Amino acid sequence: MYQVWMLAISLSVLQIGFGLITPIFPFYIVELGVGATELGVLAASFALTRILLAGPLGRASDKVGRKPVLLVALFGFAISNLIYAFAETILVMILARALEGAISAGFYPAANAFVSDMTVPENRGTAMGYLSTGNMVGFVVGPSMGGILAEFLGIRLPFVVAAVVTLGTLLLVYVLVQEPPRRVSEEDYDKYRVPVLEVFSRNRRAYSVLAVSMFANMFSIGILEVAFMLDAVQRFAFTPLQIGIFFGVLGIITIIGNILFGRASDRLGRKWLIVVGTLIGAMSLFMFMVATGIVGFYIAGAILGVAISMRGPTIQAMIADLTDQTAYGSVMGAFGAVSNAAYVVGPILGGMMYDSSGDSISSLALAGSVSVVVTLVSALGLPDYIPKSSAIEYVEDETD
């Protein structure tokens, strides 16, 4: 668990770098003279390249180790932020965003695989909660800091700060995080590796429903970050600082919830936390639709934070419960591709619907409706209990 905490701290610093730029993108788009559709393409380009590389880099973390993949991803993210800082056209920003996705695709599969390596089912939900908490600490600090920097020092400086912070994270990971013990050596990996399709075939329904749940989660977030953020800036005249505070409120609630619900999933089970969290997420999206002022948006954001903290770590823990260690990086790479596919569709569709209607109401209604359907699918399709035998166990051949 000490190593999990070290990784969580490193992840929080990385997320500060991600979060710094969140309040800035809508203003950057206005400065470059483009619309919501272009902002959607900008957001989606990150996810599109991650779809292509999440699987290969997940397999690389299984074969060569988690730590090398983490370090390469961090370095690439720092370089892409420096490109952002000096971009003068939307095309350069889209290319930088695509590069960022391509070279950081392995970070989250490797980080989740690391936690799976270091835990057992009895404490896995708690550990995933700690990892998500580290992520959300950065999520709180990053947008707030980015909003303050943009408010007083301009919209380009935060990208430089993000690059510097990410390089600091790389150093932290290199010094503090140790490669977890391997059950199969790199030389024997191909011999003992369980094909990912075989892993999925043994728990096909559970994996399918978890994939649908993860897709709906990221689809909603993608629409929120593009359509609603533009609505907040252009229709409700939010400042960068107010957007930063919004993400701060969302993040604080999620930090608290990650720890509480991560432990609850170890004691009470995974399924119903995912179901209820998805339903609460749908409710929050409908609340964004009807809110007319900053207080209403903050309340909806707080409720969304509860939903994210209920389903996020719990979905990760259930995937780990179902999956053998030798295939976990590959499985998380596949789920990363699903998540990023949703983040391609959500931002582009949200941007197009915003340009068509002039507000975010229709796109939020679509995202909320998708979440309601996925609530029913999760209630009917997820297993109530996962026996330890569900994961494919590697047994060393005593004749070798």
Image (cartoon, rainbow, N blue to C red):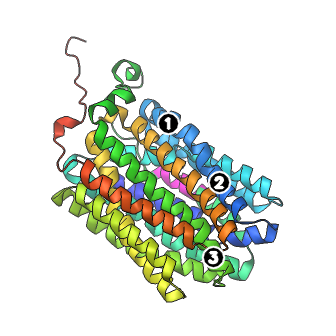
Q: Residue at x 81, y 68 (%)?
A: 33
- Residue 138 position, x and y percent, is 49, 67
Q: Earlier in the sequence, mark 3 or mark 2?
A: 2
Q: Are marks 2 and 1 in contact (CB under 8 Å)?
A: no
- Residue 292 position, x and y percent, is 54, 87
The residue tagged 3 is 231
Q: Give the residue type that dot 1 points to.
A: Gly
- Looking at the image, the residue that sits furthest to the top is 399
Left or right of 6? Residue 126 is: left
Q: Give the residue type that dot 2 points to.
A: Ala
Q: In the image, which residues are magenta?
A: 167-175
- The quarter in which the C terminus is drawn is top left
Which one is nearer the viewer's eye here, 305 or 396?
305
The residue tagged 2 is 78
Residue 10 appearing in the image: no
Q: Earlier in the sequence, mark 1 or mark 3?
A: 1
Q: Which mark, residue 55?
A: 1
Q: Earlier in the sequence, mark 2 or mark 1?
A: 1
Q: Give the residue type that dot 3 points to.
A: Asp
